Amino acid sequence: MAINTLALTNKNNENLLNTLNTALIEAILLPIIIPAIIWLFGREDVFFLQTAFPWLILIPILTATRYGTWYGLLSLAIFSVFCLFYVSQFQPELIQNAIHMLTGGLLLVILTGGIAERWKKQTQVQAQELKDCHKTTNQSEQALQLLHISYSQLEEEMVTTTQSLAGSLRLLEASLEQPRSKKDRLALAIEKMNSILRQYEWLETAAFYHVNTRGELRPTPLGRIGIIPYNLHQDSLIAEVIKSKRSIRLSRKLASSSDFANSQLQAAIPMIDNNGHLWGVLAVQRMTSSAFIQQNLNLLALLCGYVANLLSSAQHPVSDPKILFTEVSTALNIVLNTVKSVTVMTVEIPESSYQQDYQTFFASKIRGANRIWRLQKSKGVTLIILLPLFNADNTKQWQQDIENVFEKQFDANFDELTIKLSPIHFRQKVNKSSLKNYFNNIKGFSHAHLIR
């Protein structure tokens, strides 16, 4: 930058010097050369004093117009000396005409030079303002581009986080759908849960304990994060969770009671499904102090409930709207724990020979962080698509874009094929009453299946 600035300064100085040299040359030489050339051509009235207009007076006037008043006066002074000398020597009878011409020329030089300087100054001011405007515009454009980049990076980071969690859960769902024994499914679910929770650095020490059908806790943990005490399964907080089947956070008030005075845990969360069956307990021994907040505990509870429902669904396919509602609601809560807005889009596809193609189209035109449930009906299918980071405006634009692409690919629009899209938006938390009303329109499916 310094080199470029010095180079520009030197270049500007050179241009300024060239302009000054040119102005001096014109102001000094033109008033002498032009009359001399006219005299060499043999004209006696060299300065046009006997004509209707003394044309040579334009020399200093034009110089003043181009370079300003002072250069015009210099040119007029030289022109006057040369003119008066020539007239006094060869045409003394025209001396009065010469004085009148030079006096009028003086007034015109001052007038035109002043006007020229004023316009030049205004032009320079306007040029500087235009330069400043361009500079401000460039800075604003750069700031806007930086804002767009920052927003895109933030959105990408949010979607990536959600995609990582959603992707891990999809892998877990796909694994549990394969033929396995109940014990193997539980061990696999705990293993996957360990992998998911290791992504959260704020969870330092925790353990998963299995609860059998008789409500008895197995002393050996199925999975753990960090190093846990050998007798952690005997903690009074775990016993209370098994008894009450609800999450318990060890607050100061609770820790002061005699029942939990010796507890080693910060929280205990049951892995309970929608049917009320207790699969196990997540015992949280230590979290970082900054992360020990209700939001993170809610996330752990949602994950535990979600995995418990997956284990239940692996034994019994989802055919009850209430179970599907709980599954979608849990998935929404998990997403809203990471991002602030989410949209649920229902796509109703009627039965036809291209039904599978239409279903594949919708599944391929969404981001990896989105989730899709496929509801099989007697006449067609219904897709429930979860769209993180989508609000009403995003959803409207998405509907227009996807309909345009659909029309180009299949040469038909949604109205012609009676494909219906129905969105519902959530921000920061799930409104269960709104979601229930939304699900009341989804009826008559034989089974539901998460396809992404």
Image: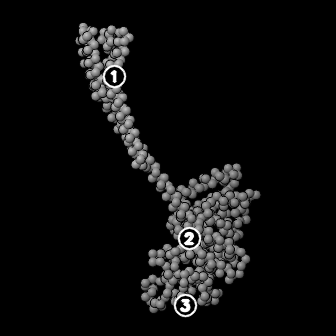
Q: Nearer the viewer, residue 125 or 295?
A: 125
Above/below status of 298 relative to 72: below
Q: What amino acid is labelled 1 in the image?
A: Leu
Question: Residue 72: x and y, percent?
Answer: 30, 25
* Mark with earlier residue (1, 2): 1
Give the colouring mode of the picture.
one colour
Mark 3 touching mark 2, by CB under 8 A? Answer: no
Residue at the image position 62 percent from the left and 78 percent from the top:
191
Write down the residue under mark 1: 29
* Mark with earlier residue (3, 2): 3
Write down the residue under mark 2: 334
Above/below status of 13 relative to 147: above
Question: Residue 359: x and y, percent?
Answer: 69, 60
Q: Is residue 280 at least partly visible in the picture? A: no
- Write down the quadrant of residue 380 in the picture: bottom right
Write down the residue under mark 3: 231
Q: Pick out the residue farthest to the right.
A: 353
